[in-house]
Amino acid sequence: MTPERFSGPPPLLVGIIPNQHPEVLRTAAEMAAKLSTPLVCAYVDEASYLVEWDPARSAHRLSLHPEKDDDDIQAVTTELKGVIEAAMNNAAAGGAPVEWTLRTLAGDPARALARLAAESNAPMIIVGTSERGVAHRIAEALNGSVGAWLSHHQSRPVLVVPYRKAAHQDGDL
């Protein structure tokens, strides 16, 4: 992992979540390696909400569940760092390692990613599709699609990486 500020070209931004299908991070890491650009991985804690936003400093958030917030966030970020490190090592494959950092954000995932993209001047935002299945469809219907919101409400290109499990292999459609 590298410091928050990168030298050289602006970083690509990828939205990540725990247990996300690996194609999203793999695609982002390979693209960053091929373009010789850093990568900002962003996890959005939906159980928190943004109370103050200052791009020069940090975001101040409050948790909807403050009694377990710090331990849960620490566990999630530790797990994500391991997953990111493995993906970056695979993407480098003998070449120069990809510079990366992990940011933990609060609030609505689409809006948080859009704010971070603006702050870091990211030329592209990379997100995944939701997994197949009835439960995921209901969640997306209620919460909305991050990729759809981003593609309609900000000016940066959005790469939506599909869940690559063949439809005929899904038993819960």
Image (tube, helix red, strand yellow):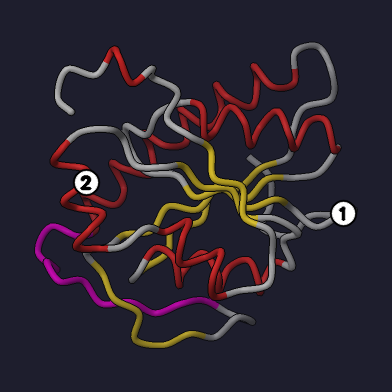
Q: Which residues are magenta?
A: 58-69
**Which circle, 2 or 1, is nearer the viewer?**
2
Q: What percent of the width, then of the height, locates residue 61? A: 33, 77
Q: Is residue 62 in the magenta section?
A: yes
Residue 9 - label? 1
User: How far across and how far down the image is residue 96, in percent?
Assistant: 84, 25
- The location of residue 74, given as percent across then percent down, is 31, 48
Residue 151 horizontal side relative to residue 149, left or right: right
Quarter occupied by the N terminus: top right
State the residue at coordinates (69%, 65%): 156
Q: Amino acid at mark 1?
A: Pro
Q: Amino acid at mark 2?
A: Arg
On the image, the x and y values in percent for residue 146 come to 42, 59
As helix, strand or loop, the secondary structure at mark 1 comes to loop
Is-magenta flag for residue 133? no
- Which residue occupies the extreme right position in the image? 8
Which residue lies under the disc numbered 2?
137
Residue 6 drawn above or below residue 26: below
Q: CA distance from mark 2 to mark 1?
A: 37 Å
Please, is residue 6 above or below residue 108 in the view? above
**Residue at point 54% right, 45% down?**
160
For the point 34% across and 86% down, the residue is 51
